[in-house]
Image: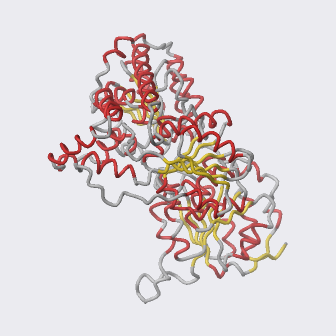
Amino acid sequence: MESVSGNELIAKSLVTNGISYVFTASSDRLTPLISCLKSKTGINVIIARNEGAATVMADGYIRRSGRFSAILTDDNGRSLSQIYGVANAWADKIPLISLSICNDDEADYNKGFNRYKFDQNGVFHEITIWRSRVNSIESLSDTLKKGVYESTRHKRGPIHIDIPFGLLDKTIAIDNTLFSESDFATKSKIRSVRLAGDELEIDKAVSSIKSAKKPLIFCGGGVIASEAHDDVICFMEEFKIPAATTMAGFGTIPIDHNYSLGGPAYTTGEAFHVAINDADLVIALGVSFCGVDGFGLPPLWSDKIKFIHVDIDPLQIGLNVSPEISIIGDVKTVINQLSAKLRGEGFISKPAWRSWAKYLSNLKKGRYKRLNKAINKDWPIIHQGKAMQELGKVIKRDDLLLVMDGGNTPVFVAMYTPPMGPRQSFYPFGMAAIGCGIPYAIGVQLASPGRRVILITGDGSFLYHVQELETIRRLNLPISIIIFNDSAWNMIRAMQYSMFAGNIVGTSLPDIDYSKIAKGFGLHATRVTKVEDILPAYENSIHSSGAALIDIITDKDNFPDCLLSFSLVEFDGLMRLLNPVKLIKSSFLILGLGRDRTFLLLSYIKKALFRINIIAKLRS
């Protein structure tokens, strides 16, 4: 038996339960606990500049590594600062272990005047799948073990545990044999729950697939979480069914695959729009049908589609679309059940499916040809698509890990990025869609020793967590930060320009030289104003081996053409309230952007929104 403090017991329990990384922010009360954690073999303690950033780092680490990590904060405002990061993990079903110190006393519930005695655990109720408060030092280890178990039981998600401050200095006698570190590596790996789909629902799904005329596979983040990408590709190739991905599912299917529609969701343009209007059956795998995907509903999606929805979380099924067939189960297991059943019944792909896939492939080729032609004009200011095309060369050459952040920036990245693999590209869009790129990139890099991470962010989003440049510099992490600097909140500005007659309000940013800010933090940094200088700037930056920043001046008058689809979804209902006079004025403003930009937008309206693609149809 050994007598240990609460601090030591927490450290031992984390090791025993496979927590390999603990992300935190400094406070006087946490100092003894952090010292205990640092003394443990197998635990890496990462100290961020604030609690919110630390939480996003932990999230990024889990997504890239597939291993556990924890966020540790002090109480009150410090604990509340991590809420948006925990909410992000909850939205995307990431098994984050959230730990906070709390007051020793019970919550005040507004009976008195102590505003610090709130129900801290209750605050996390709606954004975690399990919560607890440690009531005694004797229960501490079992509570943590239970929390880790609950985070991956059936559906995944974050858990939260409050630990009263008074327990940290208390002592308890423990049996050290109960805290073995020998199987640490095994425990740290997050295991998928291989839940099989109901056989009756599998039979129904097989019958619907066999009778479909134009089937489509739609892959979400659940495919990555289940590690089912290879299984989905085999299914797609065997039965010749085209496939699209959500933003969260980006990388599950290579964009250059013959049966892939291209980039995620509506960034694919006409191929995606035609597919979700003409398909009679959609096999949705681990998809939440969020706004970035058009919710699976009109005006983008046909209301005649029959859905087979596969998800391990029953609460996701029926949330937006109403599926004909609901299969609660693990994507990898279910897709193999479907394959085995179809194969066992001697089913082979229909000739009509090949024509359907060929048609969509023709649309994809036409889309990329049009995009490449547009960005290779002689633009006076760097086109975001051209900048991404240049960066794509080194992403592919150096096998970089990609993190996206911002509004229009991830859209441009998705439109022009080279083929990416699963767990190679990351976009924290669940509940932290803008401004979390820097801490997210830190977490992804820590999960990938020796690999360089490239973060592509907008100028506005970059400033959300600029203080974490100090963390990158202190840890000497090989992260290349690329800023598309157009001096605007340009996703919103584009709407003001194209719908409200150019009434620009609150979306202009000052011309800031972000390279000077980065240099102040000790990073290698430079500013680029010419396309031909982008790659030399990158090559010079990686010679420093550590972190670097490149501030690329881009053209604020370039809008992603597929932003029109986003507008139809996000502003559905608002469209009917828009002033017709302002819309007419907006049309003339768009014409004033120049022939090339106007042609690109009109082509998108014709090919994607109106789905007029006669040549592609004839060639199929």
- The residue that appears at 51% across and 61% down in the rendered structure is 463
> Viewer-proximal residue, 137 or 39?
39
Q: How is the image coloured?
A: secondary structure
> Viewer-proximal residue, 507 or 563?
507
- The residue that appears at 45% across and 28% down in the rendered structure is 217
Which quarter of the image is occupied by the N terminus? Answer: bottom right
Asked whether, in this view, residue 311 is left or right of residue 527, the answer is: left
Residue 427: percent from left, percent from top: 52, 47
Q: Residue furthest bottom?
A: 112
Asked whether, in this view, residue 493 is left or right of residue 13, the answer is: left
Residue 469: percent from left, percent from top: 62, 61
Residue 614: percent from left, percent from top: 31, 16
Which quarter of the image is occupied by the C terminus? Answer: top left
Asked whether, in this view, residue 441 is left or right of residue 179, the answer is: left
From what the image shows, is residue 564 above or below residue 201?
below
- The residue that appears at 44% across and 31% down in the rendered structure is 377
From what the image shows, is residue 533 above or below residue 203?
below
Q: Quadrant of residue 318?
A: top left
Question: Can residue 306 be seen in the rendering of this structure?
Answer: no
> Viewer-proximal residue, 336 or 424?
424
- The residue that appears at 60% across and 29% down in the rendered structure is 230
Q: Quadrant of residue 559?
A: top left
Residue 24: percent from left, percent from top: 64, 67
Question: Can residue 51 be seen in the rendering of this structure?
Answer: yes
